Image: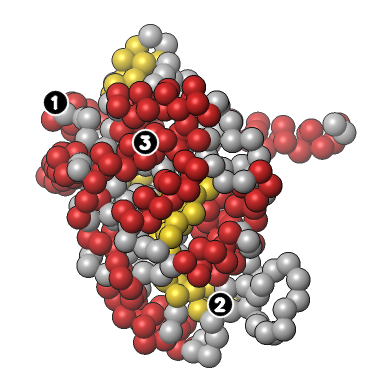
Amino acid sequence: MAKNTNKYFEKYLKFLNKHGLYPAIYTVEGPSSSPEVFMDNKKFFNFSSNNYLGLAGNEEVKKVVIENIKKYGVGSGSTRLLSGTLDIQVKFEEELARFLEKDDSITFSSGFLANVGVIRMLVDSFPYFTLIFGEKPGIIISDKLNHASIIDGVRLAKSERAIYEHNNMEDLERILEENRNKRKLILTDGIFSMDGDLAKLKEISELADAYEAVIMVDDSHGVGVLGPYGRGTAYHLGVAQNIDVIMGSFTKAFGSIGGFIASNKSISDYLRITARSYIFSDPIIPAVVAGLIETTKIIKEGDNLRKNVIGLSSYLRENLKKLGFTVLGEETPIVPLFIGSEKKAIKFSAMLYENNILAPCIRRPAVIEGSERIRFSLMATHNKEQVDYLLEVCERIGRSNKII
């Protein structure tokens, strides 16, 4: 590497380290998705995992994965358009579509790949050769607080793009009205991962109907947790039939790896031959797919798991508020404790660590400067005693730093 090029990276790293801005990255003596984890042979209470239903360590799922490693091995072999689609992948996509009450589903090797591959294809013109129809690119209309993978997916598109203020329906309608004669895609998270609040899907669906727009919901943090049988935010809010495309990740409530799109058959078949992250990436390894089939069954019957995690989250949220903290979010396992200062948030997270609690400081680039926070994530495998200890430590830190 050229000497001057290396100096470029060293300059920024030196600055970040000098000012305490380089994020702490801990080495966990696995597994990392349990309520209690070990680092340097010390036990920590883990409030940083998205393993909401605790299924990453489920014994039945692990058993299924091990059995299918013996059958399928540890790799997929190649992309699905090159070497074909395995029977177990087809079976899972059919079952996932039935679970979400959609015609079809497509799986990707990560949720990030699902978003960056799919978004542009829902509004851009057909990408690979000229067809006779002469369609022009449309416009993507995205919530300001959407996930980074949505932002990157939008950036890849040739279509116009517009950002509406978070959950602001007047701003959304203004943009829709200004672009009435264009193809339109409305993009929103179902649950916003850094704020823990819900999209206004009822209002969005009414606007989409009035202005003939397609709706895509990234429900990575909602599927498995909210709605009847854990079908997600749109079902929880009673508007699932109005959502054209549901996207999700298997890294949250499913406790695994991968991502998906569920939609009607026409959209799914179109994406199979246009979405580059589907065409040019290997799929989820088949043994893990077998585990996901088992996980889906558990989620359908997991009302007790959902009740436990939502109950503990509400308990934490309400008691933090009683202590005097500013707490964001609603009825989800994400409980953000608002700090509003990068320096104070970093210190708060470090003091939690000193008290054997693992919970991340959320700051740039995840949130804008001045809205820093500590993000607590609850799991169905947590218990009240662990949450009470977290509350006790938060109170001590909050008072010593004059936050409460």
**Which residue is labeled 2 in the image?**
139
Tell me the residue at 35%/23% (across/down).
Answer: 63
Is the Cβ of the residue at disc 2 closer than 8 Å to that at disc 1?
A: no
- Residue 91 percent location from the top left of the image: 43, 46
Sooner in the amino-acid sequence: mark 2 or mark 1: 2
Label 3 secondary element: loop
| Total marks placed | 3
Task: Inspect the image, locate mark 3, and give the three-letter code of the amino acid beneath it.
Answer: Gly
Label 1: how many residues lie within 10 Å, few (<14), some (14-19) or many (20+)?
Answer: few
In this rendering, which labeled residue sits more in front, label 3 or label 2? 3
**Which residue is labeled 3 in the image?**
255
Q: Quadrant of residue 313?
A: top left
Relative to 275, does residue 239 appear above or below in the rendering?
Answer: below
In this rendering, which labeled residue sits more in front, label 2 or label 1? 2
Tell me the residue at 36%/50% (across/down).
Answer: 95
**Which residue is labeled 1 in the image?**
385
Task: Inspect the image, locate mark 2, and give the three-letter code of the amino acid beneath it.
Answer: Ile
Tell me the residue at 45%/27% (across/down).
Answer: 68
Q: CA distance from mark 2 to mark 1?
A: 49 Å
Label 1 secondary element: helix
Quick check: can you spot residue 118?
A: yes
Sooner in the amino-acid sequence: mark 3 or mark 1: 3
Frontmost residue, 350 versus 199: 199
